[in-house]
Image (cartoon, rainbow, N blue to C red):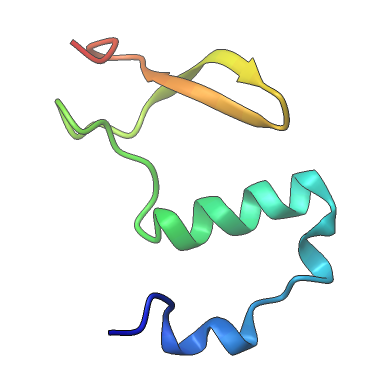
Amino acid sequence: MVWYHADMSDFPIAELLDDSICLIWLERHLHPDGFACPHCHRPERRLFRQQGAFPAYRCRACDGD
């Protein structure tokens, strides 16, 4: 069993050294259809807290409840 995706050889490591570009890349690849609350499935979000270079969001509609 291979632990990595077959396209990992195309991983753009040089371009992702910038934190803001890395965050945009991660959002697009981890959430290709956009963010959505796992509880109510609405896309509206608010910044909950900043954790280093990566922000944490909460749902504006249900606040994650």
Residue 49: image location, x then y, percent: 57, 12
Which residue sits at x=15%, y=26%? 39
**Quadrant holding the N terminus:** bottom left
* Number of marks drawn: 0
- Say above or below: 37 vs 20: above
Between residue 19 and residue 28, name the one nearer to us. Answer: 19
Q: Residue 25, how many percent across, how many down?
A: 62, 59
Is residue 65 or residue 5 the one in the foreground? 5
At x 71% / y 75%, what residue is drawn?
12
**The quarter of the displayed image where residue 9 is located:** bottom right
**Side of 14 relative to 46 (left or right):** right
Q: From the image, which quarter does the C terminus lie in?
A: top left
Place residue 5 in its image quadrant: bottom left
Answer above or below: position of 62 versus 28.
above
For this orientation, the residue located farthest to the front is 1
Give the residue displayed 30% in from the left and 38% down from the top: 36
Image coordinates of residue 64 in percent, x first then y, are: 25, 15
Q: Is residue 52 left or right of residue 9?
A: right
Residue at 38% from the left image edge and 75% from the top image edge: 3
